[in-house]
Image: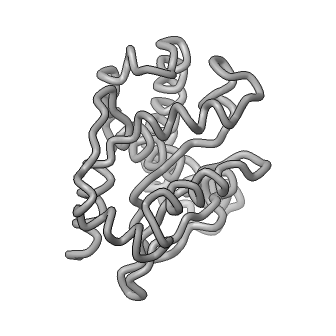
Amino acid sequence: MYDVMDFSHLLGMEGFSDTLLSNHFTLYQGYVKNTNMLLEKLSADEAGTPEYNEMKRRFGWEFNGMRLHELYFGNLSKEKKKPGNDSPLYKKMAEDFGSVENARKNFIQTAGMRGIGWVVMYYDKKADQLYNVWIDDHATNHLTGCAPLLVMDMWEHAFMIDYGLKKPDYMAAFIKNVDWEEVGKRYETACKN
C-alpha cells in the first residue's frame, strides 16, 4: 500500500496560489487512495471477469497519476535551487540539445502542445540520450525503460485557478520553481542504475 506524500512545504511558492496547490494536493491524494483500493480489490482471485479486467486497466491510470504527481511536486521548490553549469545534468542537456537553454526551450515547446497530460524529460541510459516527451493523460507515450527526470503537469487543474487559459504564464512559473538539484539527482541516479 502507498502512503500520501506531504508536499505542504510548497505552500507559499511564488507563482502558485495556496488554493491551487491545496486543490492539487487533494487531487493527488485521490490517486493514492484509488491506487490502494485497486490493489486491494485486485488481490481477490477474480481474474478473467470483465470487472477484474477493467480494474486491471484502471490500475495503470491511477498508479501513473499518483507517481507523476509525486515526481511533479518533488521537482518543485520555493528555493531557487540550481546546480552549477558544470553539473552532470547541465552538461548532458547542453550535449543533447546544444545548450541548457535549448533544452529548456524544447521542454516548454513540448508543454505548449494542445491537450491534457504531462511533459517529461526522460533519460535513456541505453542510448545515453535525453528526450522531452508529451504524455497523453497519464498512460500514453511513456518511454519504456527510461528514467523521468523533470515532470510538468499540463492538466488544467495544474494552472487554471491561477492562470486561466494563459498556459505560457504557468509554464514560466513552473520553470522558475524547478528544483534543478533534485532533477540533477534523478539524472545521476539514472546513470548509475
Q: Nearer the viewer, residue 64 or 183?
A: 183
Residue 184 in the image: state x and y as whole percent: 28, 57
Which quadrant would residue 3 be assigned to in this image? top left
Q: Residue sitting at 52 percent across and 26 percent down?
A: 24
Does residue 187 sit above or below 181 in this rendering? Answer: below
Q: Residue sitting at 40 percent across and 47 percent down?
A: 71
> How many numbered marks have been drawn onto this rendered protein structure?
0
Is residue 52 shown to the viewer in this render? no
Is residue 77 shown to the viewer in this render? yes
Q: Residue sitting at 39 percent across and 41 percent down?
A: 178
Does residue 77 sit above or below 43 in this rendering? Answer: above
Task: Give the colour scheme of this rendering.
Answer: one colour
Furthest residue toward bottom: 127
Picture quarter with the C terminus: bottom left
Residue 28 in the image: state x and y as whole percent: 49, 33
Picture quarter with the N terminus: top left
Residue 76 in the image: state x and y as whole percent: 38, 37
Does residue 125 sit above or below 10 in this rendering? Answer: below
